[in-house]
Image (cartoon, helix red, strand yellow):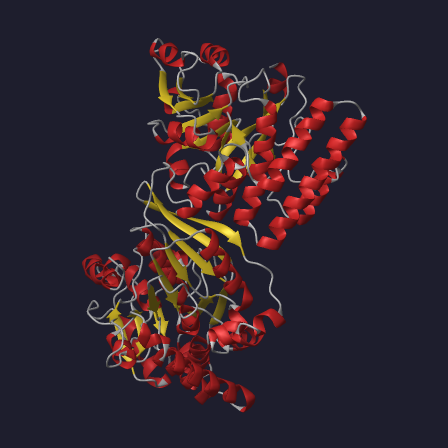
Amino acid sequence: MGMMQQHRSGIDQSAGETRVDLDEIEVVLVSYRSRAHVEQLVQMWPGLAVVIVDNASGADGLAQFAADQPLVRYLDGGGQGFARAANLGAFSSTKRFVVFVNPDSRPTVDDLRALVDGLAVDPLSASHAATVTSADEDVEIGVGGWEPDVLRTSAYAVGLHKKWPKIGVYAKPAIGERLDVDWTTGACMAVRTEQFRRLGGFDESFFVYSEDMSFGRRVRQAGLGQRLRHDVVVRHGAGSSGAPSLEMMRMKGASFSNYVNRYHPGPQAKAMQSILAGGYLLRSGVQIGKSDRDLAAQYLAQAKGLLTGRAFVAGEEVAARRMRETAQTANASVQGSAAERPYLLITKEFGVPATSGGMLRTLAIARWLAGRAPVVVVSPRGVTGLRTVQGEVVIEQLRQAPSRSLVADAFTLPTYRCLGAPRTCGSALITGLRETLAQLGPFQAAVVDHTCLFGVADSLPPQLPVILSTHNVESDLMRQRAGAESGPTKVAAHLESSLLRRLERGPGTSYPSVVCTQADADRVRRDGGAEVVVARNGVTPPSGSQRAVALAQNPRTELLFTGALDWRPNINGITWLIESQAWRDLVAERPEIVLTVAGRNPSAEFRARLEAAPGVRLEADVPSMQPLLERARLGIAPLLEGGGSRIKLLEYIAHGLPSVSTVVGASGLDNLPRGAIVQTPEDAQAFCAAIRKELAGGPLVIPAEQVAAMLSIYGWDSALGTVAEVLPA
């Protein structure tokens, strides 16, 4: 292992300053008739805890061997493949870190410590993995890699990766080469045990192979990365450790095929599947011409797996079966136990982090549902899964959205029965919904989120219970917008208001509905119609808020407005305020005042209007609002139109931030801390006068007990509790 020692330079020096105690580490060895390898590794690691997960169910006496070792645990993996066995070992560990090691690799204690020490000081990475080599010390292809797409798969299929190693799917760096990858192999990989649990562990949709690629996907979805350590080089391939090679080669092809078909749109997935299979068939023919029938058979086995998605172990089909099992619950349970049928949530926008009040409510509904059963979310961006692991909700993208076209979007008009949804959701949502119903069902209920999607409810399977969810009475909002527009836009807004009203009075009365406020319930409820329940908007309590400190350190008197900056009521409200004489007088009087306008997708025109106004600054598309909420002196909501209730005001209060709002801006909110929101008429002079008064003598921080009282009502769990009344029993 001298070569590894030569290349252990280059890791951040901070890693060398932190030494993790050996008693905080446990190694997970997934074994299949590998006793000789396991014994050798355990002898190499004195003082290190090891868990052996035996996928051969004791066939080579590993249980007795483990019983004779003081630091070794034994678990029966049940022959259920690498992913489930590795998860079993990691999820049962009580150590702070676990390191997955293949039995036929040979990492030293120093190698393992280097991985863990580096991970311990790297908060942006979910894992550190060694660069593994074959027995002849040549780096193995597939020590890591990149998310497959048609171009990368094509390059790999025709062998271009041999000349340009970074353009394929599987990475093969030179010794000592730094390389950024999307995923790393689990042959020698360290993770934080608790974080690994929260991420859902390895994807048990795969018996073996591609579970590491899928774990990388989960990691990226969580905003983290994986690090391939160029300075930790470990020899692999010390001998056979697994099922016969032809079985494994077919399994490798089947796992890749199943991966792309689960996580990528249908046409792209089929293209990748066919292209790579064609490449292996070509390689098989070349090897037959060279009289190397063994290698030809291996390539042929991979092609069979790619084309069929099926592979066998000991004569039993496991690859396609595992896909079917996990599809039924949308990857619901990392322990592999049966779960309830998932909920289906259909919405026009979904993402993490949420970048608007509407997205926050949709995300909260999805998380609330995930506390009861797995959830599959279909949106124009693709298909997302939510499930609860160890009490925490794990979110992962299951499938990317298919490409869209204007023609295909136009043909969705009869389904949506309104103008906005074909433009914002179009064929991507309809295609994703159709594939989801076919591949991930059956579902116990569907929740259709936003009025513009109500038309979709009528096209769902008749036996599927449907619940409608509205954030506002959208026809009223569109009518308000029509009043502020002119020309063709005004005509289109009036037409859309009429179409939305038809949806509210048609499908909107046929299915149980969830609305934000009692006023909304009174508007949409019809005699003889389905049940309507009120589930308030809510807020997630901030963690680790440092408002008092941040406020004291801010040299400016900062006002804050948060919200989607491509939403008409927000644009109109802000420009109404900052372009008024009352605002200009206030800034001239108090030049230290600055208004921060923070949110997503501001247009060039809106940016220009903000820049032209005195005392205004823009924070566009920020990753987190928390620092802004903590340092602001006062929140504002100068809104002139809208419906529902304002999540922004609840967020202000949750962070202890007092605020000034128009009466319209604070509509739909009650039982709030006294004085937390100062309400004014829709008059700029009155609004600015209230700001002056609050800056002069209002509270700097809302008392903690008042915030807690608000959260007891407006915490999402409390706010959404009434949704249970319309869910099927």
Quarter of image, res 715: bottom left
Q: In this view, does 482 lie above or below 216?
A: below
Q: Is residue 366 visible?
A: yes
Q: Is residue 678 left or right of residue 442?
A: left
Closer to the camera, 561 or 408?
Answer: 408
Q: Is residue 723 left or right of residue 488?
A: left
- Image position, residue 708 (x, y; %): 21, 58
Closer to the camera, 587 or 119?
Answer: 119
Quarter of image, res 133: top right
Q: Is residue 188 left or right of residue 563?
A: right
Q: Can residue 173 be seen in this view?
A: no
Q: Which residue is drawn at 65% across and 27% down?
A: 176
Given the current orientation, which residue lies at the most extreme front position?
315
- Image position, residue 53 (x, y; %): 41, 22
Closer to the camera, 330 or 318?
Answer: 318
Quarter of image, res 67: top left
Closer to the camera, 688 or 662?
Answer: 662
Q: In this view, does 622 lie above or below 13?
A: below
Given the current orientation, which residue lies at the most extreme bottom position?
487
Q: Is residue 526 left or right of residue 148?
A: left
Given the current orientation, which residue lies at the most extreme right position?
289
Q: Residue at x 60, y 69 (%)?
A: 408
- Image position, residue 295 (x, y; %): 70, 25
Q: Is residue 159 above or below residue 64?
A: below
Q: How many labels does the image show?
A: 0
- Image position, residue 63 (x, y; %): 37, 14
If the image is split into quadrants, where does the N terminus sit? top right
